[in-house]
Structure formats: structure tokens, C-alpha cells
Image: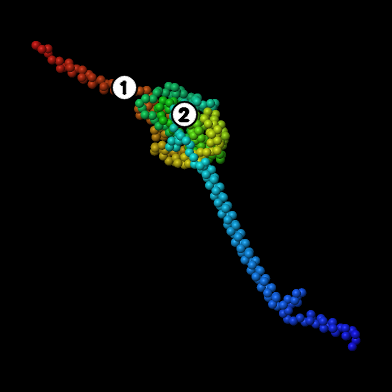
Amino acid sequence: MSNEEAEGTPAEEQNLPEAKPETGIVPTTTGTTPVAQESRRDAVREKAQLVSAQQKRSRLIWRSVIGFVAVAVIAAAAIVVTNVVAGEAGKPLSEPKNLVNGGFVVDVDLVSASTSAGNGTITEPTATPEATEEVPVEETPDATPTAAPLNVNIYTDYHDADASAFQIANAVQLAKWVREGAITLTYYPIATVTGQSNGTKYSVRAMASVGCVATYSPVSLFAYHHELLATQPAVETEGYSNAELADLAIAIGADQPKKVRACIEDETFTVWAKKQTDEVAGKKVADSKVKLDGSFLVLIDGVKYVGNPGNAAEFAQAVLKASSDAFYAPTPTPTPSEVATETPAPEATTPAPTESVTPAPGT
């Protein structure tokens, strides 16, 4: 045997196990056996199960977190809505002071209050020429002292043109009749044309501002009411801003100007204005059979005034007609017919002694 053959034989024997591995055995650097491989598969499965369980727990946790966040968002939204409603509502659903059954009674002090405003003041309100010629206010007869005053109730939206015309024409004689005790005058602010101010809700804000003046400077109420109507912004405009409303109230001499301004600019009584309007709109008002179906209404002892709102003479005639005992006329004197009915009584009694005269004694 050659040396090459002798040297090749051991090499072939050393390579034999690698060329013919036993079935089912996978050579590894660590000498893995079938049992070890099965254990590894079990470990992998166990780890997969742990990972799956962990993922399930994570999903549950995230679902819980998402649910919690959703609840928190809903709760926050509810709080916001509540705050908005309460912010609308209120400030919180507060009502002005000096309110009587939804209205403000105008007494002698209110119509006599001085004001410092320059335009449309109640001290010298503008009157129509026709009213001055036909029924001069200074010539209005005094009311009969023993007569009961008429109840004049006025429902006013501060953005209504008829309300403005009525106030300008009748302010002087209304104030005079109040001072004389001829009428009881009550203003009922309403806000029914809110949509006619390009989104600023002027009617509601103006009505709320009246509540502020009534609360902090009640003696200025009549003057402020008049000023709002005498200088009324045109319909379908934004109207006065809150700051301008406050300026107007202070200009007519309102007391406690800082509180009046804060009240108006904070819109303290806007919720009341809406609530008050909803309660009367379309319903019978002031213990009458008359429904409030518009943005301006005048009742004279429960009867709707249907005349020209800007004609003081026409309104005065309506008031005279409503007074059954000639409330605004001088004390009536007896008519000739009344004198005739009263005269016969004394004449019938006068001749009686004459007829009963007897002859003197001794005749």
C-alpha cells in the first residue's frame, strides 16, 4: 500500500459521521438533542402565550383609558354646556329689582327726575307739531280729584319703531298725568325683535340694560326708557353696543354709574329678558283679554289702543273716551235738562203753605 492510500484512509473515516448523520438529529454547536428541541418549542409557545396575555391586558387597559377619557370629555362638555347655560342663564337667572308682576311702575319721583343727557331727554321730549296744535299739554284739563286713575300699561321692545314714535309723541302728557294722579303708568319691557339687529340681539341687551338701571338707579328708569326710544337705532342695524348702552344710562344721570356699567356690560339680566318675553309673548296680558302678538302694545284700562302711535292728540282722545267720568275734563256742570228736572220740586212745595192759609179768627 502506498503512502498516499495509507494517508487517505483515516481522512475518509473521520468524515464519515458528517456525511451520514442519524435521522432526527440536527447538529448544533451546543449539541441539541430532540428533547431539548421540544423543550425549546414549549418555551416559545409559553412565551407567545405570555405575550398574547400581555397584549390582551394592554388592550383592556387602553380601552379603559379611552373609556375614561371619553367619559371625562363628555363630563367636560357637560360642564361647558352647563356653564354656557348658566352663563346665559345666568348670571344666574337673576331678576332686576323694583319689578312688579313683570313691569316697572312709573311714579311721580320717576317722571320728575332731572337728567343731564343732551338728546331726547325726558325733561324736554320732542312732540309732534300736530299734537302741540290739537292738544297742547299745558292746556290739558286737570283730572277730577275724586276719580280713580286709569291704568295705562305699555309693552315695549326697544327696537320697535312704533314704540319709539309713541314715546316721543306722548312722553310729556304721560309724565303730566302721572304727576296729577290721573293715571297709573307701567312699562313692560319685552324683546320680540331680537333677530332684527344683525346678530347682536340688541332687543334683549337693551331690555336687560333697563333692568340694570331699575336695579341700581330706579329713579332714572323713566328717563332712561325715554332715552332708549328717543334715540333708537334704526331697525336692521346692530344697535348700541353694551358699552354705548352704559354710556347712555350714565349720561341721563343714573346713580351708581360703576355698578350700572358693570351690570350692562356683563349682560347680567339677559336671561331674565328672554324668560320674561317668553312668558308674555302670544298670551293675554295685564289681566286683560288682549294678547301680546307684536313688539308694541298699549292698554288703557285693559283696552288695546289701536290709534296712531305717533299722534298725541289721538292717544289723548282715546284716554278721554276710556274715562267714564270725564277723567281728564273739568268737573262737569249741570246741563239745562238736569236743572229742569230739579226745579219743579221746590216749586211744588212753595205754594203749599199758600193754599193752606185759613181765614183770620172772628171772620
Check disc 1 and report the residue beneath it: 334
Q: Which mark is residue 110?
A: 2
Residue at the farthest right position? 2
Which amino acid type is shown beneath numbered disc 2?
A: Leu
Query: Can I make out residue 36 in this image?
Result: yes
Instruction: Count the labels in the image.
Output: 2
Query: Is 320 on the left or on the right of 10, as rendered?
Result: left
Q: Which of marks 2 and 1 is nearer the N terminus?
A: 2
The quarter in which the C terminus is drawn is top left
**Residue 84: which quarter of the image?**
top right
Quadrant of the image containing the N terminus: bottom right
Specify the farthest residue to the bottom.
1
Numbered label attached to residue 237: none
Compared to residue 122, the image places residue 38 above or below, namely below
- Labels 2, 1: front one: 2
Q: Position of residue 314 (x, y in %)?
A: 43, 28
Q: Which of 191 and 47 is in front in this view?
A: 47
Q: Distance between the residues labelled 2 and 1?
A: 38 Å
